[in-house]
Image (cartoon, grey):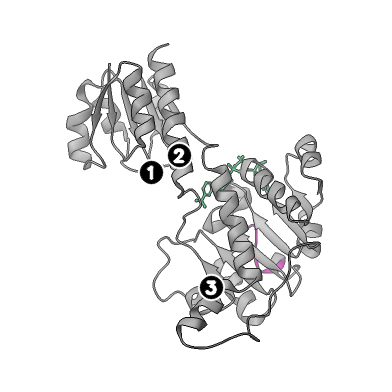
Amino acid sequence: MKVLVAAPLHEKALEVLENAGLEVVYEEYPSQERLLELVGDVEAIIVRSKPKVTREVIDAAPGLKVIGRAGVGLDNVDVEYARGKGIEVVNSPGASSRSVAELAIALIFNVARKVAFADRKMREGVWAKKQAMGMELEGKTLGVVGFGRIGYSVAKIARALGMEVLLYDPYPNEERAKEVGGKFVELETLLKESDVVTLHVPLIDATYHLINEERLRLMKKTAILINAARGAVVDTNALVKALQEGWIAGAGLDVYEEEPLPKDHPLTKLDNVVLTPHIGASTVEAQMRAGVEVAEKVVKVLKG
Ligand code: NAD
C-alpha cells in the first residue's frame, strides 16, 4: 500500500508508516499539477495546511482511502466531497494544545512585564526602567474564553501561577473546571472582572468579532487581552482603538484577521502590544505529535 506524504513530516511519523509496511512517497509541497500526477496509485495522502486536496485531486486518486492532515484546520481539504466518496479524513486536533497554551502564557508574561518593549529599548540604547513598570500575575484573575483543549491547558498553568480562573463557554465542562479551580461565569462578568482575558474559541459565526468595541469597553483599563485563537475573533479596528486610547492596558496576539499581518499595520506602531506570527503550534514537540498521531490514524484506516 502506498502513502503520499506531501508536506514535511517528522521522522518518527515516517517510521510509523514504514513500520506498518507502507510504501512512502515523500514530496514536500508539490504544485497542484504535480500532486495530480503523484496521487494516481496511492491509498493515502498526508498533508499539513498545504497542499490543497481538492475534488480534482480526490478524483485523480481512485484508490484513495484516507486523507491525513497533520494538525488541526481542515480548510485545505474538501472534506465533504471526500467523505461523500467514502474516503476518511483524519487530523490531530490535540497535538498542539500544550504548545499553544504555553505560547498564550508566554504572551501574558511578555505583555505583563513589557519584555519585548524593554528589549527594543535596550537595542536602541535606552535604559527604560521606569517605562517598563509591570504587573505581577499571582493573585490576579485570568478569564478564559473557550474552555476546550487549549483553554483547559492555559487554565491549568495559570492556576499553578497562583491566578484565579474565570471561564466562559456555552458548553461548560464542570468537572474539568473543578480540576483547574475555575468558575464558569457569563462573558460580560468575565470581561469586567479579569485582569487577563485569553481567547481559545474556534472561529465560527457565533465567535466572529466576539470581542468588539462594546466588549472591549467592559474590560478593566489595566487588563491584558491575549488572542492565540483566530484573528477574526477580535474586531481588529476596535482593538487598535482600545490600545491607542487606553481602554485596556495591552495585548498579546499570535493571530490576525489578515495573515501575514501587513507590514505597516497600526498594531505594529503600538508599544503595548506583543505580536508573534501565528507560531502557537510551532514547537518541535507539537510538530512531532501531530505527525505521529496522524500517521497512526492513517495506518489504522488502511489496516482496517
Ligand atoms: P476545542 O474545540 O477543544 O475548544 C474550543 C472551545 O470553545 C470549546 O469548549 C467550545 O465549547 C468553545 N466555544 C465554542 N463556541 C464558543 C463561544 N461562542 N464562546 C465561547 N466558547 C465557545 O479547541 P482547541 O483545540 O482548544 O482550540 C481552540 C482554537 O485555538 C482553535 O479553534 C484554533 O482556532 C486555535 N488554534 C490556534 C493555534 C495557533 O497556532 N495559534 C493552534 C491551534 C489552534
Assess mark 2: CB under 8 A from ligand 1?
yes
- The residue drawn where x is 72% and y is 69% is 223
Name the main secondary structure of what is drawn in magenta. Answer: loop
Q: Magenta part of the protein: which range?
A: 209-214
Res. 88 in view: no
In the rendered view of the protein, which quadrant contains the C terminus?
top left
Q: Mark 3 falls on what kind of element?
A: helix
Q: Is residue 56 left or right of residue 147?
A: left
Q: Which mark is residue 116?
A: 3
Q: Secondary structure at mark 2?
A: loop
Circle 1 residue: 49
User: Height in image: 236 above or below 160?
Assistant: below
Query: How far across and how far down the image is residue 42, in percent?
Result: 25, 22
* Label 2 crowd bin: few (<14), some (14–19), many (20+), radius 10 Å: many
Q: CA distance from mark 2 to mark 1?
A: 8 Å
Q: Nearer the viewer, mark 1 or mark 3?
A: 3
Tell me if residue 1 comes above or below residue 102 in the rendering. Answer: above
Q: Which residue is mark 2?
A: 71
Can you give x and y, in whole percent of width and height, for residue 119 in the image? 51, 76
Residue 118 in which image quadrant: bottom right
- Please state which of residues 211 and 269 is positioned toward the viewer in this rendering: 269
Q: Are marks 2 and 1 in contact (CB under 8 Å)?
A: yes
Locate residue 251: give its quadrant: bottom right
Q: Type of residue at label 2?
A: Gly
- 195 displayed left or right of 60: right
